[in-house]
Amino acid sequence: MPSPSFPTDPVALAQDLIRCQSVTPADDGAQALLVSVLEGMGFEVVHLPFGPADAPTPNFYAKIGIGRPVLCFAGHTDVVPPGEGWAHDPFAAQIQDGRLYGRGIADMKGGVACSVAAIARFLQNNTLKGSISLLITGDEEGPAHFGTKPVIEWLAARNDVPDFCLLGEPTNPSALGDTIKIGRRGSMNAEIVVRGVQGHVAYPHLADNPIHRLLPALGELTGRCLDEGTEWFSPSSLQVTSVDVGNPATNVIPAEAKARLNIRFNDCHTGAALSEWIREVISRHAPDSEVTVSISGEAFLTQPGPAVQCLERAVQDVTGRQPKLDTGGGTSDARFISQYCAVAEFGLVGATMHKRDEHVDVSTLEDLTQIYLTFMERFGL
């Protein structure tokens, strides 16, 4: 049996990952690269493709050790399209003036590379008493229907849920050590269709203007203060994102009016309760209406217990900064993981994520690797 190989350099691994053009839903060898590296370290890897048989989402779960605690590093290998106007080839992984450029280096191939390098250093220098795992998906930037959600459900069905999960999303706004995410707001979208009766504007008594029903309904929805915020969350926010009748004429009352809205909500609410409230308001103003709701995720909070405190200390020791515990920003795959185990998020600086010439300082890759390593050493593995 060959001796284990320990890839301890996060920069080289990040470059290799960037050169895989894994724009959602493509993988382009990114996960095969990681699997090869992890198997070389002694991990057992299970491939978990979910979704349509002709185009399944690539995912895998890797684990080493049989004891507890079980620490899981989660992440994704897919990236958003690069777009135009880059000064550096988005998939060449070039280093210039101390910065590593490439699509996905911040979000989040850099974080994945740092977690693997930290694990390699830990296994090289420590006797593993607990277990270390990785949950890697290829569908975080896309619909996210067949990625982390079914994988964590698969783990729950096997009674193999980790004790704590660390997700390497780029949580830091401007400097490594700024922010640890211990929760996220919930997010939901609603599409509203109000039906009326089309007619001539000069004969309104022969028509029923759906706009005149929709606007008061939206006024009631936007006029409500959902909450004042909580200890860890800012106030919930309802934003109307579209009102449309598709009417090119000035003398026609339309037959239908549509609106879309989004609510980012804290832990004062559930998606189901907010959905019921929206439907009640709309039906009262416009009985002949239709409301379609899509809940992207519920609000969740990981209380700052021993694991989060251990991560705080690791960040402070390496960076000299006291990280802020935060729940702001958009959604992440932590919303799925949080339903089964405690989860926190900490990764690289995200100032350039999804932008042209996405980059991070090379030095932060080493620092993040050291933070992950310090955290593992204190976690009880």
Image (spheres, rainbow, N blue to C red):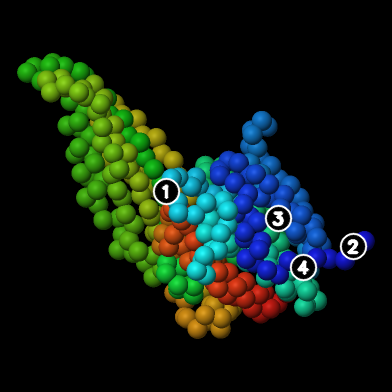
Q: Residue at x 66, y 30 (%)?
A: 54
Q: Is residue 275 left or right of residue 303?
A: left
Q: Position of residue 166 (x, y in %)?
A: 60, 65
Label 1, label 4: how far apart the Cα atoms are: 37 Å
Q: Amino acid at mark 2?
A: Pro
Please tell me which of labels 3 and 1 falls first in the chain.
3
Residue that label 4 marks: 6
Residue that label 3 marks: 34
Does 24 appear above or below 248? below
3 and 2 marks in contact (CB < 8 Å): no
Q: Position of residue 193 (x, y in %)?
A: 31, 30
Q: Amino acid at mark 4?
A: Phe
Disc 2 element: loop
Residue that label 1 marks: 85
Disc 4 element: loop
2 and 4 marks in contact (CB < 8 Å): no
